[in-house]
Image (cartoon, grey):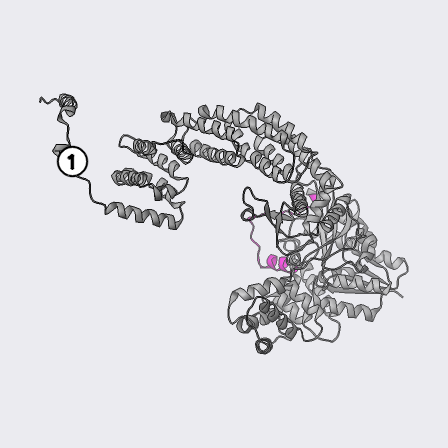
Amino acid sequence: MSHVEVYGVRHHGPGSARALRGALEEFKPDAVLIEGPPEADPIVELAGDPGMVPPVALLAYSPAAPSGSGEEKDGDRKAAFWPFAEFSPEWQAIRYALGAGVPVRFCDLPAAHQLVPLLEEEKEEKDEGEENDEGEEAAEGIRLDPLGWLAKAAGYDDAERWWDDVVEHRGSGPSPFPAIGEAMTELREQLAALPEEQASAGLPPGHLRREEQREAHMRRTLRRTLKEGHERVAVVCGAWHVPALQAKIPAAHDDRTLRGLPKAKIAMTWVPWTHGRLAGRSGYGAGVRSPGWYHHLFTARDRPIERWLTAAARVLRDEDLHVSSAHVIEAVRLAEALAALRGRPLAGLDEVTEATRAVLCEGADLPVELIQRRMVVGERLGAVPERTPMVPLQRDLQAEQRRLRLKPSALDKEQDLDLRKPTDLERSRLLHRLRLLDVDWGVPSDTGRSKGTFKETWTLAWRPEFEVELIEASAWGTTVRGATTARAKALAAHATALADLTSVAERCLLADLGDALPTVMRALADRAAVDTDVAHLMSAMPALVRALRYGDVRGTSTGPLRTVVDGLVVRVCVGLPPAITGLDDDAAREFLGHVDAVHGALALLADDDHIERWRRTLEGLVARPDTLHGLIEGRLTRLLLDAGRLHDVPDRMARAVSAGSPPARAAAWVEGFLSGGALLLMHDESLLHLVDDWISRLPGDSFTDVLPLLRRTFGAYASAERRSIGERLRRLDHAPAAPSRPAEDDVDETRAAPATTTALQILGWER
């Protein structure tokens, strides 16, 4: 006679995992069914491979061909994960079945159905403005968080804390699964007694329909297993589903529920997972806040509190914090005392954390945060065996990682690369290629790379979702280099802005994609030849110059790129004068950024002919200041002063801030001139005196109008620079005053007579 045991578990619960393992060893089933996608049945045996190290996840994905633009469209690709940790009950059920040599299968609704969105007519909509009454709130809470509802009934305000006390921290004793099944049955009966509109209140659209389909497929799989002749079947599922699998539902009813479901073409594999990803909702399971703590509870079979606090002390000692054995002993006593006061069977994470803060960390929060990161979450990256199904692109990346000795890690890791070393240069190219495929395993640090050096600094951190992105990117090619080359060509073919093309060209050089560069350069040259907008040309130049500079550093051929840059410089210098005249405030500020960017790019390029052409262009512009916005004129004057091309700057500033100049234009001129830095005012007393005199003579209303511009200008200076300018101004204020008028013997009356006569005539006076 057949015997079926249904074990309702909490996903990722160490107490459930330990109790389930004991229950299976006692029951000795001849078949094990587990909540999960049936498409994983052919690869479930990989879980017994020594190379499979949890946390890992089953990945179901539906790859699609890339769109013509090289960008993904909404809905083109879908994927879902089913994660497992060492302390997951499902993982322990799999390992038990493989070790005992009994069949193990997954019984949930196939991923081929779950990855297809529900049809519109199957969705259950809810008016957002409608408020739930008490019965609707109860229904929503029971169905979406049944454990939370049980915890509330038991007087707990935290479902995780209640589950820890009832299941996770329990010692030896009878199996908890009959009581769990009975509690879930009672909850579902309460739901069934509610009106239909209340039973579905607050649920996501289609939730009830999908739940019904999932449970129907679980029952169908169980019937099929029994029909095959298995007599002792163990079913491992979420606690909520236990009553549905124990109910006597006709097979015809389940067949009607599952008939005509849409399907998607999917593939299934194992991928590494991380403890950090277990801390959120993913796949079928609710996340846990403290995967590192749960891993410890599962692996430390005896004296878990003592072992945990000892490990915490070791973490603090590694950071040169003084923690003695006496600290650990007192922390254990405090944790146990807190648990006894609160009526808990074992000190939980809350009690251990409070004891750690009070004793080991002496009340400081920062060391507690360190333990939170290192131990409570306990970030770790799993591993899958070599024979796991993978797309060729994944295998090629793994080979590159081994060749370049770049091991993936879940923790952020700083990696300094010296591009003069062949291995570091290859590492840089690999990371840049992956970024072109939107796999941001490495993120370059702006602070770790200075212009003109051979150094790069990257922050490396492997995320499980990169596996999906690699699978999606495999549509571009079977190797990292090949896929990146194809992606770069597609991006260049569909780029509409010149700046986008220059960015692709720069990334191709950084990634050493010689096969893609000719295509990108042709597109870039064609686009640059027809683009007449000077702002577009100027915005494209910095990326091109960087590509030239660092292409040389990397030993990459940049000949075609140099031709484009040479043409852009000439066209910018020719087109800048008409484009920069007659601008309003917003356009002037935008062009100011372009001017600074081009000026810096040409300095980086260090081509004397281009720099000279650029400076002559700026000289021609400042020679006719009436056509320029004050912000632009001031900035060009400063650039030419720094280049040593102007020697009458005090006179120019005097004219710009004279009484005849509108205060707003004078303020814009000063802002543009001084935006290059404070050193000029700190070392040129005449210019500082001019600025001070202009500001002091402004009328009250005008001063109020120009104050925001002045604050923006001087606010950009460092505090030490502002303090130095203030000290110099104080010395100017204490300098001896100039005579109010020159002495009589200093006046040449003969030379002054014509001017005096003319002035008197204008005033209507006679001499």
| Left or right, residue 337 beside residue 88 | left
Amino acid residing under circle 1:
Arg
Quadrant of residue 72 within the rendered picture:
top right
At mark 1, the secondary structure is: loop
Asked whether 600 falls inside the magenta stretch, the response is no
Is residue 140 shown in magenta?
yes
Position of residue 713 in the picture relative to residue 388 (left or right): left
Q: Is residue 38 left or right of residue 75?
A: right
Q: What segment carries the magenta color?
A: 121-142
Q: In this view, does 587 lie above or below 710?
A: above
Question: Can you give x and y, in whole percent of width and height, for residue 691 in the image?
Answer: 31, 39
Residue 479 lies left or right of residue 631; in this view the side is: right
Query: What is the x, y in percent for residue 151?
Result: 63, 67
Residue 250, picture quadrant: bottom right
Residue 751 place in picture, x, y as percent = 16, 24
Residue furthest to the right in view is 229
Query: Which of these two is toward me, 483 or 69?
Result: 483
Q: Which of these two is toward me, 308 or 103?
A: 308
Q: Is residue 621 above or below residue 126?
A: above
Q: Quadrant of the N terminus?
A: bottom right
Image coordinates for residue 238, horizontal then vertical, percent:
72, 61
Q: Mark 1 points at which residue?
A: 741
Residue placed most toward the observer, 164 or 555: 555
Look at the image and tell me whether residue 739 can be seen.
yes
Vertical position of residue 315 compared to residue 698: above or below: below
The count of marks equals 1
Q: Quarter of the image containing the C terminus?
A: top left
